[in-house]
Image (cartoon, grey):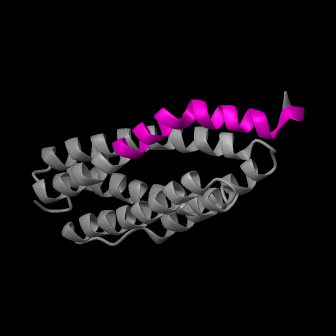
Amino acid sequence: MSNDTPLEKQLIAWLNDAYAMEHSLAKVLENHAKDAEDHPEVRAKDEQHLEETRRHAEQVAQCLSYLGEKPSAVKGMMGTVMGKVQGVATGMFGDEIMKNFLSDYAMEHFEIACYRSLIAAAEEAGRPEIAKICKQILREEEAMAEWLSQRIPDVARMSLQQAPAAR
């Protein structure tokens, strides 16, 4: 199938969006790992998530190469800028670990939705190799979302204990 079809053009656009999303999230996770320096389990998971996110960006770039494309430099740069802005935005608060957790949980669900749509688009375009990669990424996103979901109550309690003035 040629990249001239509307279906492949849309798939390329969505893959570029996913690439920018992963780059943006990498910057955010770098900040979150720093913010969690007093919380070894959270920091270790942030660092694991950061490595997964970088790998996801590489995998999405691989999907684009299957279509004869390269990641959009403009979208990638915008994602990096947005990631830095988000990191600064949560750093102002004493309960940043909780805000980071909530942000990460919301972002995981956004990523899950994006990869589900990419899988459907790749299947419609007759690109099983792209669908397969997106399914692998989806499994990791779902696992991270589940880990975050199970720990939100504990992180909330921890945040409340560390920031009694915020009550």
Residue 7 percent coordinates (x, y): 21, 49
Residue 101 percent coordinates (x, y): 59, 42
On screen, residue 63 versus residue 105, left or right, reads left
* Front residue of 102 and 117: 102
Asked if residue 164 lies in the magenta stretch, the reply is: yes
Q: Is residue 144 above or below residue 60?
A: above
Q: Which residues are magenta?
A: 142-165
Give the tally of numbered discs. 0
**Residue at the spot x=47%, y=55% of the render?**
21
* Front residue of 57 and 12: 57
Can I make out residue 2 in this image? yes
Q: Is residue 76 above or below residue 9?
A: below
**Residue at the spot x=14%, y=44% of the render?**
124
Which residue in the rendered view is the most extreme toward the right?
165
Residue 120 percent coordinates (x, y): 21, 41
Can I make out residue 6 in this image? no
Q: Is residue 108 above or below residue 39?
A: above
On screen, residue 64 versus residue 34, left or right, reads left
**Residue at the spot x=49%, y=40% of the render?**
148
The answer to which quarter of the image holds residue 52 is bottom left
The answer to which quarter of the image holds residue 69 is bottom left
Q: Quadrant of the C terminus?
A: top right
* Front residue of 18 and 56: 56
Residue 10 percent coordinates (x, y): 29, 50
Q: Quadrant of the N terminus?
A: bottom left
What's the magenta bit mostly, secondary-structure-wise? helix
Asked if residue 121 lies in the magenta stretch, the reply is: no
Which residue in the rendered view is the most extreme toward the top?
167
